[in-house]
Each structure stands twice: as C-alpha cells, then as structure tokens.
Image (spheres, coloured by chain):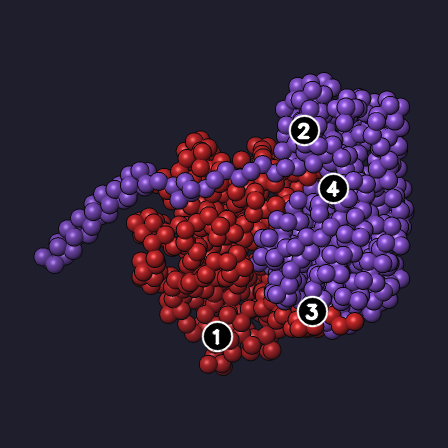
Amino acid sequence: MESVFSNVVRAPEDPILGVTVAYNNDPSPAKLNLGVGAYRTEEGKPLVLDVVRRAEQQLVNDPSRVKEYIPIAGLADFNKLSAKLILGADSPAIQESRVATIQCLSGTGSLRVGAEFLKKHYHQSVIFIPKPTWGNHPKVFNLAGLSVEYYRYYDPATRGLDFHGLLEDLGAAPSGAIVLLHACAHNPTGVDPTSEQWEQIRQLVRSKSLLPFFDSAYQGFASGSLDTDAHSVRTFVADGGECLIAQSYAKNMGLYGERVGALSIVCKSADVASKVESQVKLVVRPMYSSPPIHGASIVATILKSSDMYNDWTIELKGMADRIISMRQQLFEALQAKGTPGDWSHIIKQIGMFTFTGLNKEQVAFMTKEYHIYMTSDGRISMAGLSSKTVPHLVEAIHAAVTRVA
Amino acid sequence: MAMMAMKIRNSASRRTTTTMASRQISSGLRSMSSWWKNVEPAPKDPILGVTEAFLADPSPDKVNVGVGAYRDDNGKPVVLECVREAERRIAGASFMEYLPMGGSVEMVEETLKLAYGKNSEFIKDKRIAAVQSLSGTGACRLFADFQKRFRPDSQIYIPVPTWSNHHNIWRDAQVPQKTYHYYHPETKGLDFSGLMDDVKNAPEGSFFLLHACAHNPTGVDPTEEQWREISQLFKAKKHFAFFDMAYQGFASGDPRKDAKSIRIFLEDGHHIGISQSYAKNMGLYGQRVGCLSVLCEDEKQAVTVKSQLQQLARPMYSNPPLHGAQIVSIILGDPQLKNQWLQEVKIMADRIIGMRTTLRESLEKLGSPLSWEHVTKQIGMFCYSGLTPEQVDRLTSEYHIYMTRNGRISMAGVTTGNVEYLANAIHEVTKSS
C-alpha cells in the first residue's frame, strides 16, 4: 500500500545541532566544541547544580509525592515564585494580582504559547524581532500564525548595538506591533543595550503602543546577578504598561532537558489577568494538556527555601563568573599574541555567546585546520572554553585572521 | 566655548524634556486601557471543573467519579513501585542535558515494541517514524499539525462521542473535522452498522481517528471480529487509520490483548499512525510522556517523516522533557522492573474490572428496572452509564456524587468503600425511569 505521506521531503538539519554532530565525528584529540549552547565546567563537563541535586533528593524521598496531572496552567507555587523572580518580590504588578503566569515548556514553550494567545486575542499579528536572533524565534512565531519582521540590532562594524537603526526600525513599526526583546545576554550576539538605551527603547515602545514580548533565558547567568539581569523587564513593568515575558530555567538552573519555564502576561487589572489566564489555558489544553511536573517541582523546591535559594544564587554566580573570566582570558591572550583587530567586543559582550566577527570562510578554516567547531555565523559559546583550551582557540583565531580574508 | 555651553544647555534641556516626556508617558500609560479588555473568560474545562467542584464540597459522603486518574481501593492516587524504584535510580545519577528534538531514542524504541510487537518486522526494517511526545495529547497534536502541513486537503473523522480534547486538538491544528457513528445509546454498545456506513461513505483516502482500546468516554470497544471487518473496509476505501492508544494494559490487564486492534491493521498492511501515552498505564500523568509513530513505506521515508515531525516539535517546545522518559526507559529496559510493571498494571485493571462487577450486581440486587449489563461489557477506566444530565445533577446535589454530565463514571473512583452508596444513589435517581 502506498503511503499517504510519500510527498514528504526530508527537512534540513538543524544548523546548531549539526555542529555537535560534526564535532562528535571528528577523531582529533584537539577538537573543541564551541557550538554547544549548554554550560560546561572547566573540565568540559555538563553540570548539575548542587542545589538541584538536593531538591531532587528531597522529592524522591517524599513518599507523599504523586505524579498526578498538574493543572493546565502548571504548579501554582512555581508560577507565583517565577513571577516574583523576574518582576521582583515587591512588584506592584504582582501585589495587584495583575500578572497571569502559566508554567510552560522552557523558553520555547513560553514563547509559543504566548504567540498563540496573541494570534487569537491581540489586534495585531506582526512581531518585530532583532536581526540577528536565536534561530528558532522566527519558526516559533510563524507556526503560531504571526508574521515576522526584523528590526536592526547588531552592527558588524562596531560588533555592538546598532542603536540608531533599532530606534528607526521600531519607530517605523505600525502602532500596536509586537516587539520581541531579549531581556539580557542577547543570543547570538551577546550585545545588550545600556540602561540608558533601554530607557529610550521603553519610551519609544510606549509612545507607539508597541507590545513588548521579553525573552528572558539568562536571568542571573549573564551578569551573575538575578536583579541586574531583570532590570530591563522591571523598568517596563514599572511604567504600568502591559507586556509578555517568557522565562527559562534551562541555563540558570541547569535544568535544560526538564523543560521548565513560565509565560507571564502583565495586565492592566486583576480582572483582565484572570480572563487572560483562562484563555491561555485554552491554548495549552489542545497542545499538551498540562505541563511536566518534575522540573517545575525542583524549581519550586529551591525558590521557596531561603537556604536553597541563597545557595542557588552562589552557584549561579559561579557559572557566570567562569564565563566572564573566559572572556577576559581570551581577550588578553589575543592581545598578547598581537592578533590584528579590535577584540574588545569579547569583554563587552555578555552572556554565554560571543559574536566573534569571524566570517564563514574563517570559521570553516578554523574547523578544518584546528578542529574548532562553532556555528558559521562566527558565534562561539564561552561555556565551551576552559583555561586549558584558550591557547588553542587563540592560535586558531590568529591563523584565521591573518591567513583567510 | 559658546558652542560647548550651548551643547551642555541643550543636553540638559533634553534631559528635562526626556524626564517630562517619560512622566507623561507613564501617566498616559496608567490611564490607557488594557489591550485585553475584550478577552472573554474562557469556559471551564468540562472534565476538570468536576474535580474543582468536588474539592469544594464539604460533605463527608462525597464521591468523585469524574476523575480520569487511577485510584486505589482507598480512593488514593497511586505511584507504581516500579516507578518509585526508577526514580531512586535516576536521582543524583544523571545529567539534565537536552534530549534530541525527537526525544529519548531508548524510550521510543521500547515504546514501539509495546505497540508494534517486540519482534515487529517494521521495527527491524526501521520503517517507523517515531518521536517522543508530550503524552497522548502531544502525540495527537503533532500528528494533527503534520497532517495539516503535508495533507492540507484532508479532514479527520472523529467518533461520536470522543474525549472532548480531540476536537480541540484538530481544531487548533486547523484540520477540518467530520464525525462518524460510534456509540449506540439504545444498546449502550457499539453502533457497528452506523460506523461501517460512515466508513464506507467517507471519500476514499480519508483520515480516521480510532481508539485502540478502552474507548473514552464510553468504554465500548469493537470485538476482534468487528475490528477485522473495519480493517477490511478501510483497506477497500484506502483510508488512513490513526490510533489513539491511551490505555494499553490498563483495559484488559494484558498489553498484548489491548493492542489487538493495531496488530490487526498492521497484519492487513495498513500504514497507520499511533499516539501512545504512559499517563495511565504507568501512572506518569504529570510527567507528560508519550510517543507518536507513523508507519512508512521504507526506512528512507521513515527518516524523512521523522525529520518533519521534529520540525514541528522544535517551534513548539524544542525538545521533550527528560524525566518521564528516563523513568520509562529504566523500567522497560530492565526485565525485572518490566515484569513488576506488568504485574502492577494488571492489578489496576483487575481492580477496575472487579468494581464493574460489584457495581452491576449491587444495582441488580436493589431491583433496578433498568439493565446494567453495559457496566460489565464496557471496558477500561470509564463507564458510560446512560444517566441523563438531569439525573447526574441530582446525583451531585442530593448525594454529593461528582461525574461529568454526559453520565460518564470513572470506575477508577469506585471503591469497595463507596460502591454500595453509589449503587444506591444511582438506583434512587433512575428507579422511576
């Protein structure tokens, strides 16, 4: 019998995952994987936080714990604690019950559920996203039925923010358009607006009635401080306006595969927030009915214990500090080597990734000659570097920059 | 010097203007109305609303037979021993890295064996495109999205009645729906001729949703002979069969028996799709573990189809959750644990079958004028009692018994402690029927 799906063609490999596949196939002992978007220790190993292990044990040892369905909107205490984490415990929006928070499948799930809600209930169906952005963003919004436009963001000439271009493009956006903003540690560039620039963005967004949709995937992971990394979001919420926020615990709690995140919709009133929550549940039910319990239970266990919360902030700072120190080491090593070019962007950029500015040919050269794996846009994961491997990377960059145009 | 002064003056006044403007914007924002004031409150979910009402009832006699989750004879939720053991092995032992988009390969392999058979030629020949899914809901939704993308002109035929969320799933995937006859209210059994007529009259190559076993909400399943006839007619009409199997092992107590419908279709050469869930049969409800599989012509097509299923999963949740998949892999990969699981599933199924018998006998003993044969003929977690919405309302208001208004009783909520009370109440509201 012929298949009803014989017309289906093979989908292209995921560009990011393809890097790890190639890395795995490379027999060279000197190989280095800088494509990986997950934290690695100095020894190049994945890390499960100590505080996560403790929470895990607590859950396993509790005989009263059951595995029943959790509500469609997820665990109630997880939701409350997540909103507090991103908005601040003293946020008036929370105190006034104006925030609808729904547990979702990490950042991706929060973005998708939020986008589907917007498609159904918001008067505008265009979303402006920065150029460049995480590769999955346009797919998430397209599948939700939104149309995607770009605003200028990265300036290759300065390897920094194209602030003028950003203001122009958002200034030209239709009134009410949705705007995707990376709360901190922009992926893939690591380039964030300053707080003055954020203030200008906020004013522009509000003056044009644009609807901000924050993607917060690195809170605490970027600067080492949870509050600092939430600053952009909090200033928007402080002005009394509405916004959406997608939160992920993949990186900052190392819970990658457990798929833990939250979508918060900050509304004008408690009544509206309650109705909004009820409608978001209608998006979730036909997608997966209710979110997974395990990861959210770990998060809730940690956030509600002041001891565990404190321990978490210390481990989180540890991860952020290691990455910051890798930036410093790489920069200093390139300076010491006399590698041509201005490499200060390495220490100016923030978060897991550095947009090196290397072009496709240089990247290919580094892979072929030095067994260094990264995405072809020149993005390297600082999390994949260690003090031991910095020299090898510096050799490779130096060679690429001096020998390949 | 003058230029400098002007610059400073200008920037100062710009700052002042900026502050004033931002204050204006802020106050303007506070007075601006919400973007969402036109959002209507959504209706309560018909199934979950029942449990909410139950929880709010202070009566000591209250009974919850709306719940779609297994309860033991004390009315308590159950975590299987094999699951507890698997969790003990996981805690502290593994990393929490991302799974691939298609999920845990190990877990998917074990899951396919359950549905297709341990020695299935289709598994050997790598003809099955399969991905880990967010339980049964997630599998159905991925398939619906896939159907929309690659067979955009197709519709889905859904039985009447069905689990209410099936309609939501295909609607949100934007696949048009049609229905086919299934439940026969007069006999409280299968409307087989109605079903066969609808299958025959559907245009060639239509997509049908079938419940592999333990139909939800009616508990009415075709017999083996009826399944064979359905399969033959599907062959003649070149229809596509999509099986939702949420109760394998949980219906009869024997996973192989519960997969019979699927095995018949496979023998007859159909290229089917299957949604599998571990919510009930492993008690992993909240972990959201399941699997979507599509049987293809050959290995190449299976690789292709899988790649496209992953393309649909990536913008929905990127990759599926790890924990539940680990539990399943550990249990099914360890012969001792797997045996333990099979025993525990049988215990759950047997308890329910026992409660069906007891409920029916109690009603007959009370001298009910109605036939309650269907209580023991139907199979799985649910009994479609035949109670009217008004009778259900009376059960709730007078007897504090909670069930969905379609008269569906979750036998999982029936215990030796409440079965007499339940029988009595049902008798009271139906005896003048």
Q: Viewer-nearest of labels 1 and 4?
A: 4
CA gap, disc 3 and disc 2: 46 Å
Q: Nearer the viewer, residue B220 or A213?
A: B220
Colour used to depict chain A in the structure image: red
For this view, does A262 lie left or right of residue A56? Answer: left
Earlier-in-chain disc, 1 versus 3: 3
Badge 1 and badge 3 in a common chain: yes
Whether residue B339 is visible, yes or no, is yes
Rendered location of residue A163, percent (x, y): 34, 60
Q: Secondary structure at mark 4?
A: loop
The quarter of the image holding the N terminus of chain B is bottom left
CA gap, disc 4 and disc 3: 31 Å
Determine contact: label 3, label 2, CB under 8 Å: no
Identity of the residue drawn at 83% across and 22% down: B420
User: In the drawing, what numbered circle is on residue B390?
Assistant: 2
Q: Nearer the viewer, residue A124 or A340?
A: A124
Q: Secondary structure at mark 3?
A: loop
User: In the drawing, what numbered circle is on residue A359?
Assistant: 1
